[in-house]
Image (cartoon, rainbow, N blue to C red):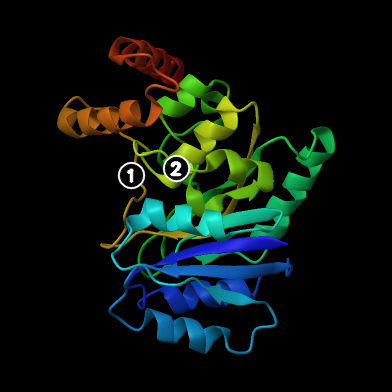
Amino acid sequence: MIDILLATYNGEKYLREWLQSLSKQTYSDWRLLVHDDGSTDHSMHILREETAGWPQEVKILPPEPKPLGAIRSFEKLLKASDSDYCAFADQDDVWLPEKLALCMEAMQKEEAIHERKTPIVVHTDMRVVDSELNKIDGSFWQYSNLRPALLESDVHYLAVANCLTGCTMLLNNAAREVALPIGENAYMHDAWTGLQVMLHGGEIVAIDTPTLLYRQHEGNTLGAVRYRFSLLNWKEKWRLARQSYRGGHPQVFKNRLHFAWWKMRYFIALHI
């Protein structure tokens, strides 16, 4: 069984569409775990209304006294999961019908090669769309100039430029265990999980087939950014570099010089 880990917060505008796309999955052996982070809109009403007739179990975790934020919400969901597999979900995307089936097929193939105690993460590409689901780009990886084969070849590269997007990820139980607890310096739950899997000798499987519509709107916590090399936006690049360094120090990068060395190596590898 797959535990679908959904963190909600004031998601009434798009939540219904995501729930409907989940109900249309061709792979049906799953249950939905939800943590709501203090929504003041109709998110929970929509959730209960849409899932009322589902054959699958829906479990809403107890609320917290104060908002947790995205990272700690997903950490709480990871801790609550006890299935063999789990998948992160965002409230504003639309899943394509074969998403879970495709990821599960890849996971089972990888587990047939390695022991089940090996941490494994499967992740996929996405179609980038606007708030009305109009196509922006058919591939998030191409749109953002991300190359999973390069980034996943070395944990230093992955720590410089994460290519795992949480809403596409499927984790086996071993990957869930190494991801917990999520460190205080984590950039995001997905980047942290990818690094921990690699640091613990696990496997990351990238599928270049888009499995969801990645909606871009004014409320995105993190969104798709078209890659453009320019020195004009150096302030934003500096901010992102600081985040990457904090997320990878000290487990991956010994110091700032070590980070700068791998940042330069990645830039060269990306542009040759």
Residue at which label 1 appears: 225
**Image depth: mark 1 or mark 2 in front:** 2
- Residue type (three-letter) at the residue carrying disc 2: Ile
Instruction: Give the residue at x 22% y 33%.
Output: 239
How many angstroms separate mark 1 from mark 2 (CA)? 25 Å
Circle on res. 145: none
Query: Which residue occupies the foreground of this view, 257 or 137?
Result: 257
Query: Which residue occupies the foreground of this view, 162 or 217?
Result: 162
Residue 153 in the image: above or below residue 169: above
Q: Position of residue 234 (x, y in %)?
A: 18, 28
Residue at which label 2 appears: 182
Quarter assignment of residue 150: top right
Question: Could one spot residue 134 in this view of the protein?
Answer: yes
> Element at badge 1?
loop
Instruction: Give the residue at x 46% y 79%.
Output: 16
- Residue type (three-letter) at the residue carrying disc 1: Val
> Element at badge 2?
loop
Instruction: Give the residue at x 29% y 15%.
Output: 256
Instruction: Give the residue at x 26% y 28%.
Output: 242
Query: Which residue occupies the foreground of this view, 146 or 271?
Result: 146
Quarter assignment of residue 56: bottom right
